[in-house]
């Protein structure tokens, strides 16, 4: 009764999605000195839903701003990997 490739892929996507939103929302909570939000975001795992509520609802971030932040994260990682080669 092992996992099939499709199930593993779904799990990997969900984990990546959750980690991305978790890291971004916690980072913003620290930057904005929102201690209560920081604790809540670190403790609760809601598959990114609470993280998105914090980012879009509490901080009033717009979707292009969030997209740009995510893109800059990935472009930095890509540049660092290229420099290692």
Image (cartoon, grey):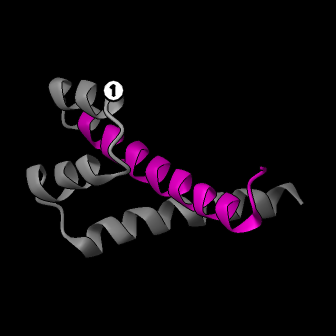
Q: Could you tell me residue 67's position as x and y percent?
A: 36, 71
Image height check: is 22 above or below 11? Answer: above
Q: Residue furthest front?
A: 1
* Camera-nearest residue between 83 and 70: 70
Q: Residue at x 80, y 59 (%)?
A: 83
Q: Is residue 23 covered in magenta?
A: yes
Circle 1 crowding by C-alpha within 10 Å: few under 14, some 14–19, many from 20: few
Q: Could you tell me residue 9's position as x and y percent?
A: 66, 64
Image height check: is 6 above or below 52? Answer: below
Q: Left or right of 23: which side holds 40?
A: left
Q: Which residue is mark 1?
A: 43
Q: Left or right of 77: which side holds 46?
A: left
Q: Quadrant of the C terminus?
A: bottom right
Image height check: is 75 above or below 44? Answer: below
Q: Residue furthest right?
A: 85
Q: Is residue 18 covered in magenta?
A: yes
Q: Please tell me whether the stretch drawn in magenta is mainly helix, strand or loop.
A: helix
**Kind of element beneath mark 1:** helix
Q: Residue at x 38, y 50 (%)?
A: 47
| Corner quadrant of residue 61 | bottom left
Q: Which residues fall within the magenta stretch?
A: 1-29
Q: Residue at x 28, y 43 (%)?
A: 28
Q: Residue furthest bottom?
A: 64
Q: Could you tell me residue 1's position as x and y percent?
A: 77, 50
Q: Could you tell me residue 50's position as x and y percent?
A: 24, 47
């Amino acid at each position: 009764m092992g996992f099939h490739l499709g199930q593993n892929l779904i799990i990997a996507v969900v984990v990546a999605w959750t980690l991305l939103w978790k890291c971004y929302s916690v980072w913003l909570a620290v930057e904005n000195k929102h201690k209560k939000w920081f604790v809540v975001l670190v403790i609760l795992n809601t598959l990114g839903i609470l993280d998105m509520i914090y980012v879009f609802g509490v901080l009033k971030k717009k979707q292009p701003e969030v997209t740009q932040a995510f893109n800059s994260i990935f472009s930095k990682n890509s540049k660092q990997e290229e420099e290692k080669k």
